[in-house]
Amino acid sequence: MLLIALPVGLVIGLSLGALGGGGSILTVPALVYLLDQDPHSATTGSLIIVGITALSGSIAHSRAGRVRLAQGLVFGILGVAGSYLGSRLSASVDPQVLLTAFAGLMVVAAGAMYQRLRASRAVAVSAPAVVVTVPAAEAVGGAAETPPVRATAVRTDVRWWVSRRPAPKAALRVLVAASVVGLLTGFFGVGGGFVIVPALVLALGFEMPVAVGTSLLVIAVNSGASLLVRLGGDVRLDWGLMALFTGAAVIGSIAGNRVASKVDPAKLSAAFIVLILVVAGYTAARSIPLLF
């Protein structure tokens, strides 16, 4: 069982680090069907694994300038109420109902990732060509002095963000998205990155790499809030297994940060969508017959 936890944790961490979401949705099925955890313990354990992994991944992305700290914290805090409500509801739901609903959530996540993939491809196709001019001195082999390139720092202070606050409609979308993410995190033990990333892109105008990095910070905040609620109840966890799984996932998230800058994210997303759909089908096939 412990040997299974290592590769599964690596795959989930890799997805979180490279895509900013999606990987956490595989954590619960992995804990239930591969590591023999009951659904309620799996959703609680998933919060530990996903939260710590997302936090480590956000640190790696932050070093590369791909995390907006203030916006991420605000988004996460807005979802705390949803996290609390979701955690309370999850404890009262039948395990097989929880798994059946989880299968549906995976299909929705796959659809959201597919839409994001199509949108990114459309942008790539419609992007204008960039014409690069070479100074005459360089064209003939001479040395020409080129002006220095000034890097634009990612602003993270709160006052700057408040001065650039979104319009009322965009702010409402952020509030709704944050609440939905918190509810999903609390109820299912997932990160909700497939909702966070599009919300950050559409409502706040983030570039995709920054949205991916910031989403990991949001996932860490929501996971921590949900875990605090659950640990107040009767929770039994295999802490040794959780530690091993989390350690493997953290290593995977660090590797995923490097993958994000070297591998075509479209190909990675497409492969992961297929994997999610396969796991969703398996989960539904196992849980639905037990409802009757």
Image (cartoon, grey):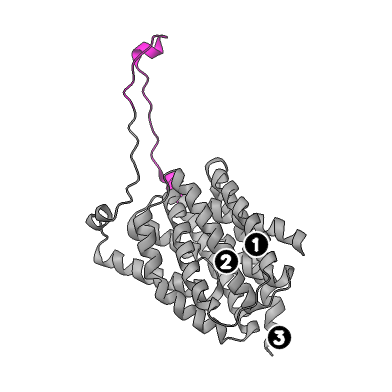
Q: Secondary structure at mark 2?
A: helix
| Prevalent SS, magenta region | loop
Magenta residues, as a range?
121-148
Q: Nearer the viewer, residue 80 or 261?
A: 80
- Residue, x 64% and y 56% (percent of image)? 247
Three-letter code, disc 2: Ile
Mark 3 vs mark 1: give the one in front. Answer: 1
- Are dots 3 and 2 in contact, CB under 8 Å? no
Which badge, 3 or 1, is on the more N-terminal residue?
Answer: 1
Q: Is residue 268 visible?
A: yes
Q: Label 1 sits on what residue type? A: Ala
In the shown orientation, is residue 132 left or right of residue 219? left
List x then y, in percent, for residue 11: 65, 55
Q: CA distance from mark 3 to mark 1?
A: 31 Å
Disc 1 crowd, CA 10 A, few/some/many (<14, 14-19, 20+)? some
Check the picture and name the quadrant holding the C terminus. bottom right
Element on which disc 3 rests: helix
Residue 48: give its label: 2
Magenta span includes 143: yes
Residue 204 in percent (x, y) is at: 33, 57
Q: Which residue is mark 1?
A: 243
Inter-mark Cα distance, 3 to 2 = 28 Å
Residue 153 x %, y %: 34, 41
Does residue 30 sit above or below 257 in this rendering? below
- The residue at which mark 3 appears reads as 290
Residue sitting nearer the eye, 46 or 267:
46
